[in-house]
Amino acid sequence: MLVRDAMSTVVLTIGPTHTLRQAARLMSARHVGAAVVLDPETYGLGILTERDVLNSLALGQNPDTEIAGTHTTTEVVFACPAWTLEDAADAMAHGGFRHLIVMDGNEPAGIVSVRDIIRCWAPDRRASAQLTG
C-alpha cells in the first residue's frame, strides 16, 4: 500500500504568527494532530504537532502569547505519495516523529501519520466481527 492511499488530504495550513491556542483550536476543529506552518516570508514549510503544543504547556508557557513559529519543526522530512507505507514508517521510526508532510511537487498534498499507517495495516475489526458474529 502507498502513502497516497493512507494519507489524510485534510491539510491544515497556518502561519508562523498564529498563537498556540489558535493552532490548537484549528487542529481540534479539523480533528488533525498536526498543522503545516507556511512562512510567507521564507516560503518555508514546517510542522506544528499536538506534541509541540503539549510541550509548551508543560513548560508553563502561555498559549495566547506563544506563536507557532517558535515551536515549529522546520527540518522536516517530506514523503512522496508514491512511497510505500513501509518507507513512511521507516522514516518516522528513524526520525522519531509521528507525522510526515506529503508533497506533490511543491505543494503539500496531505499528511500521513502513524495512526494512518496502523489503520491500513490492522485488520478491519468490523469486518472480522461480522464474520464471527
Image (cartoon, grey):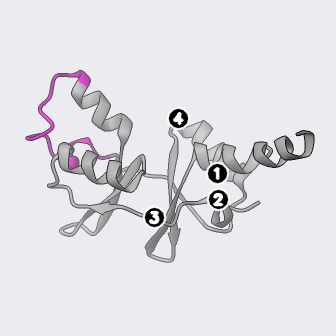
Q: Nearer the viewer, mark 2 or mark 4?
A: 2
Q: Point out the image quarter for the C terminus.
A: top right
Secondary structure beneath dot 3 equals: loop
Q: Which residue is mark 1?
A: 88
Circle 3 crowding by C-alpha within 10 Å: few under 14, some 14–19, many from 20:
few
Q: Magenta stretch mostly in which secondary structure?
A: loop
Secondary structure beneath dot 4 equals: loop
Q: Identify the residue at the far left of this view.
A: 65
Three-letter amino acid code of the residue under disc 4 = Gly
Q: Nearer the viewer, mark 2 or mark 1?
A: 2
Q: Identify the residue at the far front of this view.
A: 133
Q: CA distance from mark 2 to mark 3?
A: 12 Å
Contact (CB < 8 A) between labels 1 and 4? no
Per the rendering, the mark at residue 49 is: none
Q: CA distance from mark 1 to mark 3?
A: 18 Å
**Which comes sooner in the sequence, label 3 or label 4?**
3
Q: Is residue 58 above or below residue 53?
A: above
Q: Which residue is mark 3?
A: 10
